Image: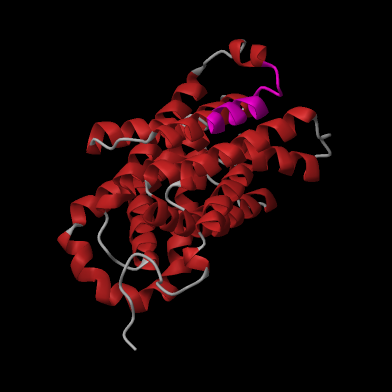
Amino acid sequence: MPVDRTVSVKGSRLADQAWLLMMLPPLFWAGNAVLGRAVAGAVPPIGLAFWRWCLGMLVVLPFAWPHLRHDITPILARWKSVLLLGTLGIGIYNTFQYIALNTTTALNCVMLQSSMPVMIVLMSLVLFRDRIGALQGVGIAVSLVGAMTLISHGDPGTLLGLELNAGDVWMLAAVVIYAAYTTLLRRRPAIHGLSFVVVTFAIGAVELLPFYIWESLSGHPVQASGITLLAVGYTVLFPSIAAYLCFNRAVELLGPNTAGLAIHLVPVFGSLLAILFLGEQPHLYHGIGIALIAAGILLATRRRA
């Protein structure tokens, strides 16, 4: 039987479970934000991003190779789109996020990240003249309110008291970059998901290499330690390989506007991780925020489902 060269593995039940594909990336990204903040100052941001993509590419390459040999022609035919996507989603986005986490609070970072679904809708409108239906618009709004409820701990005054600093500007730029990446995913060539991931990971690693060398020579080299190994190992396996494969497939199944709602699940999983591993106590606003996000996603995906 010939191997399917489309973006995903057709016929795979896992690859067609849109709800699961939307849930896994924000779970891994929530862990990435917590870890990135925890190791800020111990692991330099560009070094963490470089080794994340470099090792991620090497891990995926043996599995991608059988597909990559056949996909090289469509990749070269649309090399400009592949280069742009690798630059935006791999080379720039997470590097900006790690830089931001060195100088901003986790609250500010998550708040700005939660604006990404709205940013994706705006990007789709500007770049492709996409329109959203009334039900999808209501769903996006309800989901955003739920995210803000979690972030503010149920107190809107918390959001009014936030002040932007340099880290917030970096994070806002990262949000715009990833919104553009998500919107432009429709321009990627019709190749296997593993081929796309390994090529874009390689693009990001190559682009980060000179900045990584500069960072190291400037007195901030990556030190071999348990913290470094933990941070790089987690980011390679989960926020990188697993999350990008799932998110790219979700965009293929649902479109960028609907798949982008998965970002609102980041504060949901962040709250749950804090309760499970940091001993924080659950509160009423947790239930309200999670219920609003779930309702918003349900409304936004109802027509397509």
269 vs 212, nearest the viewer? 269
In the current view of this chain or complex, which residue is farthest to the left?
A: 77
Q: Position of residue 144 (x, y in %)?
A: 54, 29
Relative to 79, residue 285 above or below: above
Which residue is located at x 42 percent, y 40 percent? 93
* Residue 52 rendering spot, x and y as whole percentages: 50, 53
Give 130 or 44, whichever is nearer the viewer.
130
Q: Main secondary structure of the magenta part?
A: helix
Q: Is residue 66 magenta?
A: no
Q: Is residue 158 above or below residue 24?
A: above
Q: Is residue 101 visible?
A: no
Q: Nearer the viewer, residue 54 or 152?
A: 152
Q: Is residue 33 left or right of residue 119?
A: right
Residue at image point 61% right, 30% down: 146
12 horizontally vs 78: left or right: right
In the drawing, does residue 249 fall left or right of residue 13? left
Quadrant containing the N terminus in the rendered view:
bottom left
Q: Position of residue 13 (x, y in %)?
A: 51, 71
Please count the marks in the image. 0
Q: Residue at x 29, y 45 (%)?
A: 184
Give the vertical position of 167 relative to 265 (above or below). above
Q: Answer with the quarter of the image where residue 265 lies.
A: top right
Its colouring scheme is secondary structure
Judge by depth and name the residue closer to the eye, 163 or 289: 289
Residue beneath the point at 58% across and 51% down: 23
Percent of width and height locating residue 80: 19, 51
Range drawn in magenta: 142-155
